[in-house]
Amino acid sequence: MRDDATVTAGDIARLAGVGRAAVSNWRRRFPDFPGPVGGTSSNPLFSLNEVESWLRSQGKLDELPFDERVWQQIRNSVDDLQLLSVVSDVAWSLVGGDAEPDAGLADAACRLAAELGTPETVEFFYRRYVETNSRRVQVPSPDVAAAMVALLESPATVFDPHCGFGGLLIAAVDAARRQAGRVFGQERDAAMARLAAARLAARGVKADIRAGDSLTADAFPDLEADAAICIPPYGERGWGYEELTNDPRWQYGLPPRGESELAWVQHCLARVRPGGQVVVLMPPAAAIRRSGRRIRSQLLRTGALQGIIGLPAGSAPQSTQPPHLWVLRRPSDNDVVPSQVLMADCAVDEVLPAWRAFLEQSKGAVAIIDLLDDEVDLTPSRYLAKKAVPVTRSVDESQAELAALSRKLADAVPKVLQEPRAFTMTMLGELIRAGAVQLEQTPMRMETESGDVPLLTAKDVTLGRGPTGKGTVEAGTITAQPGDVVIPAITRVVHARVITEEVTLGPHLFVIRVDPELFDPHFLAGFLRLSAERTASSISGTLRIDVRRAQIPRLPLDEQRHYGAAFRQLEAYERVIDETARVGKQLAAQILEGLTGGTLQPVTD
C-alpha cells in the first residue's frame, strides 16, 4: 500500500457507512479532521492513512475492509487517465488473461479473489471504477438492459457491436440462466473491451470480445449471430461516412452523414443470420429526421422493422431524452412481409408485456401503409390512441369541489401590508465566504432511474413533491438535512425548497445549509426564489442558476421569521391555486367529454 494513497469525501462516506453530508459535517465540526492533501476545492482529496486513523479515533471505523484497501491501492497507483487500463489488466489477469499488471497489485487482487471469489472481485473492481468516474462513464441501467434482452427469443449466440463494459451481453447471459451459448462483442476502447471480457469470463461465459470500431474496423465480418443488441453512440458525425460509402452492409440505403445511428442498425442486421433478431436503443430524433426517411421506409417495406417502443426520459445512458427501442429482424428469402408494426409508449418494466400483446393480440399494431407517407414519422406517440378522461365522479361533484376550492382560495391569500421598505442587501456568495451559510452542489450526472435509494430530483423540487428518482449512494452523492434549502441548478421555473426530512438528492441541485441561529431557512428560500431567477443566465428558455449572485436582505432573525412565515403562507396559497386549476380543467374535460359523448346536454332557456 502506497503511503500517499488518497480518498475523496465519497470514499470516506462509504468507508464509514454514512452519507456524504455527514463527512461535510465532520469537516466543519471537528478541527482535527484531516485536511485535504490534493484535488480541488469542489472535490478535495484526503490522505487515506490520516482518514483511517481519525475514523478509528472517533469510533467510526473498526477496521478498513480489505477490499477497500486493495481498491485504494489500485486507484492510487496511476492517474485517472490510466486507471481504466490498470483495472482492466488486473481483472483480466484474475481470469487467466495475458495481462501483466504490477506485481503488487496482482498479488493484492489474487488475495482478495481468494477471499471473495473471482467473479465477485472482478465485479467489485468494475463497480468501483464506474463509481469513481460516474460523471464520465455512461453505462446502461440494469432495467433497460433486461428489457432489451427480454425481447430476444432465447438466442444461442448474441452480438453487441458497441459493448462498452459488457452490460448488455451480461444481461443476455443472465436472462439465459447461463445456458450454453456464446457472446460476441466489439468495443473501441481496448481497456474497456478487456474489462468487459474479464467480467464475462469471470461468469464462465464463452465470450469473444475484440477491440476496435465496429463500423470502420469490423472485427466480425463473417459473423451470423442469432441476435444483436446495441446502444449506439448518439449523434456522431465522424463515423466513417466517406470511407464506407459503398459498404455492402447498407442494404437499406446509405446512412446520412448525421445519422450514424442508422449505420449501427444496419451493421447489426448484417451480422445476424436470416431471421435473426436485433434490438437497438435509439434517440427519438432517429424516428423523424427527414434525412433518414428513405432508410426507415425500406426497413418497413422489407419487414425488417417490427416495432418501436418509446421509453421514459432518462432511460438512455447518454441522453436525458426519452429514447426508442427499435425491434428488428433480418428478413429471410421466404418471409412474408408483415402488414403492421408495433407502436407503443411504456415504462421499462412494461416493454415485454407490450411486445407479447402485439404478437398475440395485435395490440398497439399500426398498419405499415399508414406510415409510408412523405415523412415516414415513426414516433410512437403520434399513433397512440388518446386516453379518454376517466369518469370517477359526476359533473355536480366536480362543480362542488371547485366551489369549495374557490372559497378556500380567497382565505389562503397571505396577509401583507402595502408599505414600501428599503433593504440593505448582500450577495449569498458573501455569506458563503463569511461562513454564515454553506453551499454544496450535486453531480451533473447521476443515475435516477434504477437503484434502491429514493432521490429528490430537480423536477421534484420544482413541482413540490416527494422524491421520485431511484439511485445509489456513490461518490458525490449528497444527503439534505431538515432545514437545508434546495434549489435546481438548471430549470425553467425557479423554486427554492426547505427540506423537512432527510433525503438523498439527485443531479443538478444546489444545497444551502444555514445556521438556524443566524438564518430562517424559509426567509432565505423565499428571497432566493426571485433573486436567483433575476441573476440567472437564460439559454433557449432554460435558466442556469448562479446562487452565489442572489441578493439577500440583511435582517435580524426575528424579522426573518416573519418573512419566512409569509413565504410559507404564499406557498400554501400557490398550492390551492394549482389544485383549483386542476379541478377546473378536469371539470372542463368532463363537460366536453359528456357533451360530445351524449351523456350531457346543454341547458336551454
Image (cartoon, grey):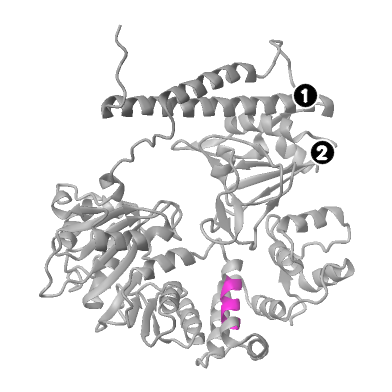
**Residue 294 percent location from the top left of the image:** 16, 56
In this picture, residue 274 sits left or right of residue 118? left
**Residue 403 percent location from the top left of the image:** 52, 18
Say what amino acid the circle numbered 1 marks: His
Give the SS element for disc 2: loop
Task: Evaluate if marks 2 and 1 touch, with contact meaning CB atoms under 8 Å apart.
Answer: no
What's the mark number on residue 516?
2
The residue lying at 16 percent from left, 69 percent from top is 251
**Residue 488 percent location from the top left of the image:** 59, 42
Above or below, 45 against 312 in this view is below
> Which image quadrant for residue 534?
top right
Give the SS element for disc 1: helix
Please tell me whether residue 389 belongs to the stretch shown in magenta.
no
Q: Nearer the viewer, residue 262 or 471?
A: 471
In this picture, residue 285 sits left or right of residue 192? left
Above or below, 496 against 250 in this view is above
* Image quadrant in which the N terminus is located: bottom right
The answer to whether residue 413 of the structure is visible from this angle is no
